[in-house]
Amino acid sequence: MRAADWLLPGLGHWRLGFRREARKYVLFLGIWLAVVVLRRERIVQLYDFAGPTESTVALAFLALWPVAWALAARRGLRRLLSPAGRESLSQWQIALGMMRRNARCVLGVRMLGVAYMIAFLCPVLAPYDPERTPPDTIVNKLAPPFSTVYVLGDRERGEIYCRAFRLEEGGAVFLDRAEEFAHARVRLDALGEPHGGWKRPPTGARSLGGVTVPFREELHLLGTDDVGIDLFSLLVYGSRISLSIGFVAMAIAVALGALVGTAAGYAGKWTDFCLMRVVDVLMAFPRLLLLLLIYAAYAAAMMDTSIFLVVAVLGATGWMGIARLVRAQVLSLKEQDFATAARALGFGHWRVMMRHLLPNSLAPLIVDATLRVGDTILTEAALSFLGMGVRKPTPSWGNIVEGGAKVLHEAWWVATLPGLAIVAVVVSFNLVGDALRDAMDPKLRH
Amino acid sequence: MLAFVVRRLAWGVFIVFGVVTITFVAVEAVPGNPFSGLQSPKMTEEAIARHKEARGYGPGRTAWDRYGEYMERLARLDLGRSLAQNRSVGAMLADAIPNTLKLTVAALLLDLVLGVLLGVVSALRQHSKVDHALTGLSLFLYSMPGFWLSLMLALVFAVKLGWLPRYGIHDPEETGLLDYLRHLILPCVALGVAAAAATARFQRSALLEVIRQDYIRTARAKGLSEGKVIWKHAMRNALLPTITLLGLYLPFLFSGAIITETIFGWPGMGQMTIKAIADRDVEVVTAVTIVGTTMVLIGSLLADILYAVVDPRVRLS
């Protein structure tokens, strides 16, 4: 292995004939290069466009990407050069191997990879600020996908937005959304450098009879929403919510459920009875109703509409099924010899529970949790859709659809596109979860 | 059997009690009182004081007093009066429940028929193109947010194509059954299709497990037609897990109905719930919670009973 092989990921693979692996590494670096080159202007002044936290996260992600990939390539090459012998594999290694061979799982992981990449790089990728309503809502709102808004400079009034404009003798005619309706007419010599300066530099110029009129084009790839915010930027920023909430809420639910389930199963008797009755009562609540109730009560009580509250509430209402699952596992595990041995060695209850019983019931727990992540994402989206979850101006896919539902008659894209994004992410999680379940189930292994 | 049902019903009363208590605590945790949102200029101070007195918010009254009173009223099956609508909650429920029930039952039927049928088709042609297409479709459908599916159906069939109505249960000045059914289609499909996708997945794996068993080979060996083998012998066993699932769907459909009804303007419990939560209409929220929980409990009880009916090996105890 030469130094260049791991400084330039994929080169070693290519040189040694592993063309398929090499292409994978090159593709990944290509995406990185494309992002860096195409968005170089944004990256250079990232902190001016976006908040400090998300800018730092995005820059760190961009910086660590090639490093991580080079390390992965190096490790992969080492493994290819000296394949592991028939050493014994752990349960998890076997499962991982099975999942690697499962095409649907690989597809799911790739889609999730792209989704998380977008979420990390949101300030780099989003062309506009998703939390700021543009100055001219009437012109900007409900632009269909692939439409362009033109911005011209008026020396006295500042920037003027229009959907199209026409230069005529004596003036410029601005056309608004319906195209045939002119909404303003400005003398040609009044146009140029706008009052207060360009917010962003102009991208083109048209001239008529010796007068040159500079203008800026703002492309809305996926159109705009009902107040004129770029939908693509909204979707890119909204991905942060869906992709993080599913995980974090699930982690809270798993922690709570594992704790209650282990305690109930291990202690037995009255503790078990009482805890399980609480679980019964909470499970009898239709979940959405429980969420709405808690949320209505606490959001009002704490005057708090932050994301943390949504996460906490989702976690606090999702643990009951997990508690039942863990309890059943612990009930059967604690009768086994290793548990008795651990007790006989004089270990405390806490240690037996946490170090012996819980790790052994981890496999079904993890499968269950993965399959529930998708469900949690859907629930969060539903809450946001009902206006009880993440609220505007923080974009989440659920509350973008809510805005789109109001303008369904005029603009199909606002409600449709974020929904597609939700479906893509949830499908990916379900693909991975299904594959994990199949891989962890010894009955299906042959 | 009877003893089992009685025991389960008694247990159900306990659960409803727990649920009411939790709801009460959640409602009490809201700062202020249910009157905060109601300060219309037309209401005089005395009128507000009178209302407060009548509902246990008078001077010197604590949450414990209100809880006791509420439980006492509930024991007499008196659900109180809605503050926002000034109607008896019982009357409001009597208006809303039939609508929700019709929608839910229609969705449940769609779920059962479509789900079982698709599940059987893809199990019988395992690993064929049809099977792959159906499995993919059902994964797609159940990964879909219910509200989004509702909106897309409304967009395509009501807004763009104009085939079906967008809102409500009747066109103005129409009362016929046909008109009602036309209004029912979209919400019913929105609610039932995602559930059907899950049922189909479930049914597929259940049937696959059953048709590998020896008694199916025996049935085939003695010369029964394939239709008889599948529908009379295999399905009798393969339907069991699906039936349990159906009972458990009732709460899911109820949760789904909250959103679907809001989107399609269906005047049922879902719409009532959202409005009551927005208005902080305590009495209505509690009543809706009780009804929702009862539906869940009845669903799981029905599932158990049906299970015993279909499978003679199951003894309820």
Image: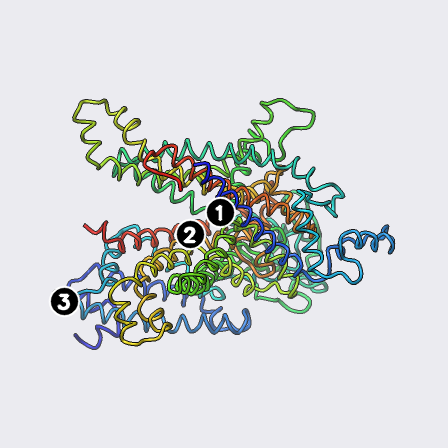
For disc 3, the chain is: A
Q: Amino acid at mark 2?
A: Val
**Residue A137 placement: quadrant:** bottom right
Instruction: Give the crowd class for mark 1: few <14, some 14-19, many >=20 residues within 10 Å.
Output: many
* The residue positioned farthest toward the left in the image shown: A85
> Could you tell me residue A360's position as x and y percent?
30, 64
Question: Could you say whether the residue bearing mark 3 is in a helix, strand or loop?
Answer: loop
Residue at image position (54%, 54%) is: A231
Q: Nearer the viewer, residue B167 or B68?
A: B68
The Cα–Cα distance between marks 2 and 3, rounded to whole angstroms, is 36 Å
Q: Are marks 1 and 2 in contact (CB under 8 Å)?
A: yes
Q: Quadrant of the N terminus of chain A?
A: bottom left
Kindly identify which residue carries mark 3: A87
Give the total number of marks visible in the rendering.
3
Tell me, yes or no, if residue A145 can be seen here: yes
Number of the label disc, if any, that sits on residue A54: none
Kindly identify which residue carries mark 2: A426
Q: Nearer the viewer, residue A19 or A236?
A: A236
Q: Is residue A238 left or right of residue A84?
A: right
Q: Amino acid at mark 3?
A: Glu
Q: Amino acid at mark 1?
A: Pro
For disc 2, the chain is: A
Q: Relative to residue B189, is residue A160 depicted above or below? A: below
> Could you tell me residue A386's position as x and y percent?
59, 51
Residue at image position (36%, 56%) is: A328
Kindly identify which residue carries mark 1: B145
